[in-house]
Image (cartoon, grey):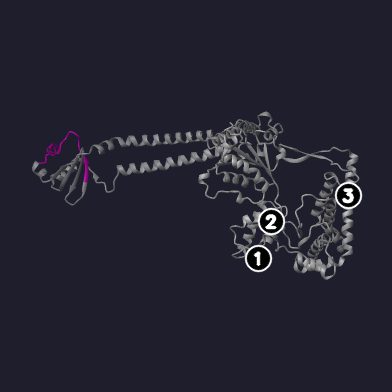
Amino acid sequence: MVLTNICMGKNLFKNFLIIFLLSAAVMAIFSLFNTSSGEPETVGISVVVDKIDQGQAKTVEISGNELTVTLNDGTKLRSVKEAADSMSSLVKDYGVSPEKLKKVEVTVKEDSGFAFWMSALLPFLLPLIVIGFFFWFMMRQVQGANTKAMSFGQSNVREQHAQRRGDRVTFNDVAGVKEAKEELKEIIDFLKTPGKFLALGARIPKGVLLIGSPGTGKTLLAKAVAGEANVPFFHISGSEFVEMFVGVGASRVRDLFRRAKRAAPCIVFVDEIDAVGRQRGAGLGGSHDEREQTLNQILVEMDGFETETNVIVMAATNRPDVLDPALLRPGRFDRRVILDDPDIQDREDILKVHARKKPFAQDVNLREVAERTPGFSGADLANVLNESALLAARRNRKQVTQADCLESIEKVMLGPERKSRIMSEREKKTIAYHEAGHALVAHMLPNTDPVHKISIISRGRAGGYTLKVPSEDRRIHTKTQFLEELAVLLAGQVSEQLVFHDTSTGPSSDLKQATQLAAQIVTQFGMSEKLGSRTYGDREELIFLGKEIHERRDYSEKTAQVIDQEVYRLIDDAHKTARRIIEKNRAYLDEIANRLMKKETLERTEFESIFKKQGATSSHA
């Protein structure tokens, strides 16, 4: 409301400014109409008669009651006579002989009807016209404000017609998600040939819910379905329904579905539907909460479709657990399509799609890029290639190289390099031994990921980093893998303690990750022999706040003490494992740290050559 008042104030000031300038222009025109440059001198009638009597007058022009006298020297005089007097009687009354008047050229000028009426009416009409225009302009603005106020109930949906779409998105533009595309082909067939399904009495799902992590391509997949079916596509975000005014969201829902039914067959895509589709009854507004009213209207519209209405509602969310159960029942979003994070082959296919319009050098190997990006979503991979193109442009190259692609991965994961950061020799040596500890323990343990790169160049908030990349995609993890990962996380601190007999703040992030992982091993994965195969604690989310801020404890205080002891034991065992490996291979630790201090970065081949040179074998061979 405050924003509306500010906008109306700005419009009112603008209107007054326009009226002021218009009035000034009219007054200027009016002044020009009534005045002219070089106006004759106004004199009495006796002066005019004297000039005629003395023979100084050359011409006399009569225009109504006005006399314009031109003297022999070219001077002009202006005078006004009585309306009833003629020129001859006027001269005769002043005792001038008719012969002298005959020497003067007398002309009578008749005013045109237009000029007469304009001179008579213009002084009255102009003010009335200005005032009337002012009132008309103000009324027009008021009507416009009323129209805008009534348009609150109209949806801000973005409509994309099939016949206007030059660069149509199809399944060829969506790499990976093979199962999701197979699931959606039935929707495309229904939109193309609905009669085939209706003749058999089949009811196509009215709602399709796309579920996946952020960046997995939910919106792109919905556009591809519309592109494959060649039907109109309506796109709106869930947050665009809800306004501060009661009933606006429900009105926009009705408007959206009314427009969609007119354009059927079509697809309505609601992005981030959890903005309005969260469970009812959990908010602060009670039964009159605007978000709940909007959700109720969506439920009614989806369940009220006629059988012949060819409108498919697609929605996307990454939080299906918070959606209202009424949205997921049959007749609404009864088909759920899961979009997983891409595996290594899908990542390579996604990179090929995003690499179509980029000039790559011959040394670019997208398979290697895919291997170094486990856990990346489609949006992350697109960002990697975009960053690589930006790096190539910054270095004034015409093509993107493999080095640009690999460097962009680290930039996306950790942030840009901070080469300008000045480190003392002591700090540089501490970071070098810290990262060398991580790399050494990861190399010696058989169930950890291979080390691909070690660097002591700061990136983002990290002083250095050790990049470990899995050799294959994993869906499940074993207890042994978790325990060895704990040892790798604690190896940086152990290395500092052994070399410098002191600890720094560098391992703080490692300790946090290790503590969280140990707690998950005990409470969530059921991997503690002492506590048995069960979970502990039930995390619940307060819907109206949208955060996991409440955990229901389903165990006693005594059990909580045992959990703390188990977490401590796991971390202590991992600490001892890391210490044992580093003490046994101290020579390798010194060699890795010395090379890092000289070169700042070690790639996998150079890192593994340290062990081959001294006759050691890799646990990952």
Q: CA distance from mark 1 to mark 3?
A: 48 Å
Q: Which mark is residue 274?
A: none
Residue range in magenta is: 77-97
Up/down of 20 relative to 610, above or below: above
**What residue is pinned by disc 2?**
412
Q: Is residue 416 visible?
A: no
Q: Which mark is residue 568?
A: 3
- Give the secondary structure at mark 3: helix
Q: CA distance from mark 2 to mark 1?
A: 21 Å
At label 1, the amino acid type is Asp
Residue at 73% x, 60% y: name it.
Answer: 458
Q: Nearer the viewer, residue 502 or 15?
A: 502
Up/down of 65 relative to 521, above or below: above
**What residue is pinned by disc 1?**
363
Residue at 64% x, 61% y: name it.
Answer: 391
Q: Nearer the viewer, residue 250 or 450?
A: 450
With 433 as the anchor, is 279 left or right in this view?
A: left
List the single residue furthest toward the left. 99
